[in-house]
Image (cartoon, helix red, strand yellow):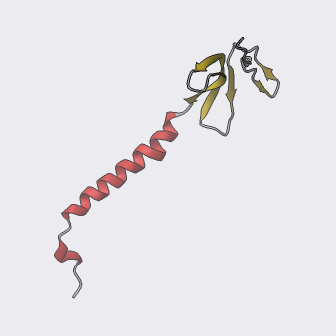
Amino acid sequence: METTYLLLETVWLYHSDLENNGVEPIAINRARLPFEMILSPKESFAIYLASYDTHYSFTGIQVQLIRNNRGKLFAGYYLLTGVFAMLSTLSFTITPEQVFLD
């Protein structure tokens, strides 16, 4: 018995007026987003699953996110987390007698 299977082709990416040839990545840079997206097609491949006695074909896209501005990340995450940690540390200096109500 001859085994045949369908092998998917490599993904072609389209975005606005950009088109790739199935090999080159596409870079998308939107002003609203704090990062640049790079979409790269992955080559298709097939694997044989002996337990099911069949072939499966796979293909995909790799998405890379490259941050444009680290200042927003620093101010929006690291700075706020640091302030919260400092305030939490200061709360250990308050004795229970100072907040106890009679």
Outermost residue on the front side: it is 1
Q: Tell me what residue is drawn at x 74 percent, y 18 percent.
A: 6
Is residue 37 visible in the rendered image? The answer is yes
The answer to whether residue 58 is above or below residue 95 is: above
From the viewer's side, name the closer residue of 101 and 63.
63
Q: Is 89 on the left or on the right of 58, as rendered?
A: left
From the viewer's side, name the closer residue of 93 and 14.
14
From the viewer's side, name the closer residue of 84 and 12.
12
From the viewer's side, name the closer residue of 83 and 37.
37
The quarter holding residue 44 reads top right
Is residue 39 visible in the rendered image? The answer is no
- Could you say where residue 65 lies in the image, as x and y percent from the top left? 57, 30
The quarter holding residue 26 reads top right
Q: Tell me what residue is drawn at x 67 percent, y 18 percent.
A: 25
Q: Tell me what residue is drawn at x 82 percent, y 24 percent.
A: 17
Total number of numbered discs in the rendering: 0
Q: Is 86 on the left or on the right of 33, as rendered?
A: left
- Quick one: quadrant of the C terminus? bottom left
- Could you say where residue 53 lies in the image, as x and y percent from the top left? 62, 22
Q: Tell me what residue is drawn at x 60 percent, y 26 percent.
A: 52
Q: Is 38 on the left or on the right of 4, as rendered?
A: left
- Could you say where residue 7 lies in the image, as x and y percent from the top left? 72, 17
Outermost residue on the bottom side: it is 102
